[in-house]
Amino acid sequence: MADARKPRSFKPVAAVSFLAAVSAFVVLFAGAATAASSQWQDIGGGKVRLVALKDPAEGTLSGIVEVRLDKGWKTYWRSPGSSGIPPEFDFSGSRSIEVDRVHFPSPMHIEAGGSVFYGYKDTVAFPFYGLAGTGETQLRLDLLIGICEEICIPATASLTISDDDLNVSDPKAQMQIMFAETLLPQAPPDDLRATGLKQTGNRLELEIRAEEAGSRLSAVVWPRDGGWVSDPATAKPQENGSYLSVFELPQGVKVPDIESGGWSFALLLQDPDSHAVRKAVEGRIGTPAE
């Protein structure tokens, strides 16, 4: 199923500003109904909830999984590295709702307990989109997420929003979703994009066009049907002016053919000294830049 809605472009806003921005939106709509949201659920180093809005006329659903971490705690991006725990979002327990996929905000470069990975601090919101059927509906998420202070632990939560709440037209929930979209990676421009993916046995090679000098460039690839995400791989310059990232498929992992168009990529431009992420782009391999 295609994405129910196209994400907006990334803007460099700190994750902690999510709360302040949403609070400003809430003031604007102070007279609106209560947000369509689940109860907060404790996950040990923070708490998590669902926020969602159903459009009965269009038959669509949009929402966010909001994770509010305690001070000093972190969580992972879609590619956590060899020892991390990426978030897993299971909406299969929903009634008359089909969630397409969950989108990941642009990550930070994080060091914790001797580990280095891409992830998030403070508050992070994962937007999702889908379709809602007629009749009684219920949104349910079973979440597995890794959270870290000095060591990293798996945390779980089960969250629901009832049919009555989903049918409320609430501007506050819409504003929260819209703000979360501004923190997503942008579509790849002509001067920073993947130009090809090749497979030889268990070896994948991603060719990249990158014209921004003075930055460290890393890449991640994954099949759109899920099941496997590569570890981040540094892109190395080639004689023809392009860059190349190399990935190794684990033994036994089945992935779609390269020619199928079923692959996605993310590119991260980082400061060469601090490794702070300057820019994140994300797109489909073989799809022209948007």
Image (spheres, helix red, strand yellow):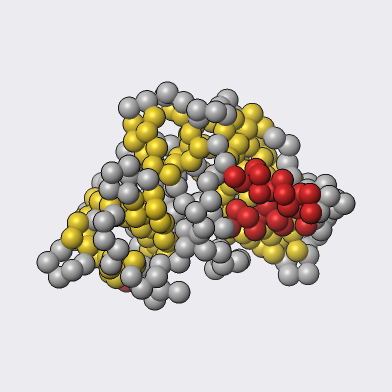
The answer to whether residue 284 is left or right of residue 28 is: left
Relative to the observer, which residue lies in front, 136 or 239?
Answer: 239
Whether 131 is drawn above or below 51: the answer is below
Q: Seen from this angle, which residue lies furthest right?
A: 31
Tell me residue 92's x, y (percent). 61, 49
Residue 16 location, x and y as percent?
Answer: 57, 41
Residue at the location (22% across, 62% down)?
A: 243
Number of on-image labels: 0
Picture quadrant of residue 257 = bottom left
Relative to the observer, which residue lies in front, 109 or 250? 109
The residue at the point 54 percent across, 44 percent down is: 15
* Residue at (38% x, 63% y) in the render: 263
Q: Is there any visible trace of residue 65 in the rendered image?
A: no
In the rendered view of the protein, which quadrant contains the C terminus? Answer: bottom left
**Above or below, 279 relative to 93:** below
Kindly indicate the quadrant of the structure image that contains residue 119: top left
Position of residue 280 measured from the top left corner of the image (x, y, whole percent): 41, 56
Examine the image and state in which quarter residue 181 appears: bottom right
Q: Is residue 235 visible?
A: yes
Is residue 59 shown left or right of residue 5?
right
Residue at x 47%, y 63% (from the top left corner): 186
Image quadrant in which the N terminus is located: bottom right
Residue 107 lies, in percent from the top left, at 45, 47
Between 280 and 204, the residue placed more toward the observer is: 280
Q: Residue furthest left?
A: 239
